[in-house]
């Protein structure tokens, strides 16, 4: 697993996906970042991930509702998950497994935690931590 602030260097060996734990990247000290900061972070995440074939942000309904226009502005699709601790994490992992099963060899995960480290056993993994 490689954790870095910015990758932008796909290996060129296969298909690459970007999966975003929206709450982890847009909440700071329990509060939402301002909309302009949210857009800046989302754009930075896309840039850091480099060329990807699939991008998906995952979050509970209230978060998706809060950020839908910003996600659309930066061309990021989203999926809703049930509310609760680590619900996005528990949803991203099987999505990542499905992508790997369909030929994706590189996964970029934008998250503020280390939940996804085991994915490194199945694909080249880059964890993007937009908060530093």
Image (cartoon, helix red, strand yellow):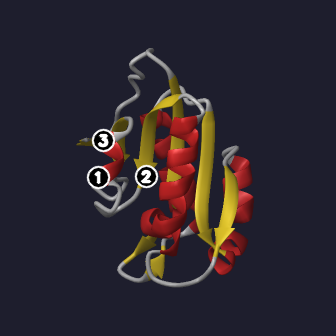
Q: Mark 1 packing: few (<14 Cα in 10 Å), some, or many (20+)?
A: some
State yes or no: discs 1 and 2 in contact (Cβ < 8 Å). Answer: no
Q: CA distance from mark 1 to mark 2?
A: 12 Å
Q: CA distance from mark 2 to mark 3?
A: 18 Å
Q: Residue furthest front?
A: 101
Q: Which mark is residue 104?
A: none
Residue under label 1 = 117
- Residue 42 place in picture, x, y as percent: 53, 51
Q: Secondary structure at mark 3?
A: helix
Q: Mark 3 packing: few (<14 Cα in 10 Å), some, or many (20+)?
A: few
Q: What residue is shown at x 59% (from left), y 62% (from top)? A: 58
Q: Quadrant of the C terminus?
A: bottom left
Residue under label 3 = 121
Lower position in the chain sequence, tag 2 or tag 3: 2
Q: Mark 2 packing: few (<14 Cα in 10 Å), some, or many (20+)?
A: many
Q: What residue is shown at x 31% (from left), y 42% (from top)? A: 120
State yes or no: discs 2 and 3 in contact (Cβ < 8 Å). Answer: no
Q: Secondary structure at mark 2?
A: strand
Compared across the picture, whether 103 is left or right of 86 comes to right
Q: Which mark is residue 110?
A: 2
Lower position in the chain sequence, tag 1 or tag 2: 2
Q: Residue furthest top?
A: 12
Compared across the picture, whether 107 is left or right of 56 comes to left
- Residue 6 place in picture, x, y as percent: 34, 37
- The correct choice, above or below, for 124 with respect to 28 in the image is above
Q: What residue is shown at x 37% (from left), y 53% (from top)? A: 130
């Amino acid at each position: 697993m490689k954790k870095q602030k910015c990758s932008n260097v796909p290996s060129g060996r296969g298909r690459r996906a970007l999966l975003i734990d929206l709450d982890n990247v847009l909440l700071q000290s329990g509060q939402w970042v301002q909309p302009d900061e949210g857009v800046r972070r989302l754009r930075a995440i896309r840039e850091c991930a480099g060329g990807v074939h699939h991008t998906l942000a995952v979050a509970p309904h209230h978060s998706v509702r809060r950020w839908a226009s910003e996600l659309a502005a930066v061309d990021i699709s989203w999926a809703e998950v049930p509310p609760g601790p680590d619900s996005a994490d528990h949803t991203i992992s099987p999505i990542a497994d499905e992508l790997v099963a369909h030929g994706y060899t590189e996964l970029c995960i934008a998250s503020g935690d280390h939940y996804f480290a085991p994915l490194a056993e199945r694909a080249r993994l880059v964890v993007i931590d937009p908060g530093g």
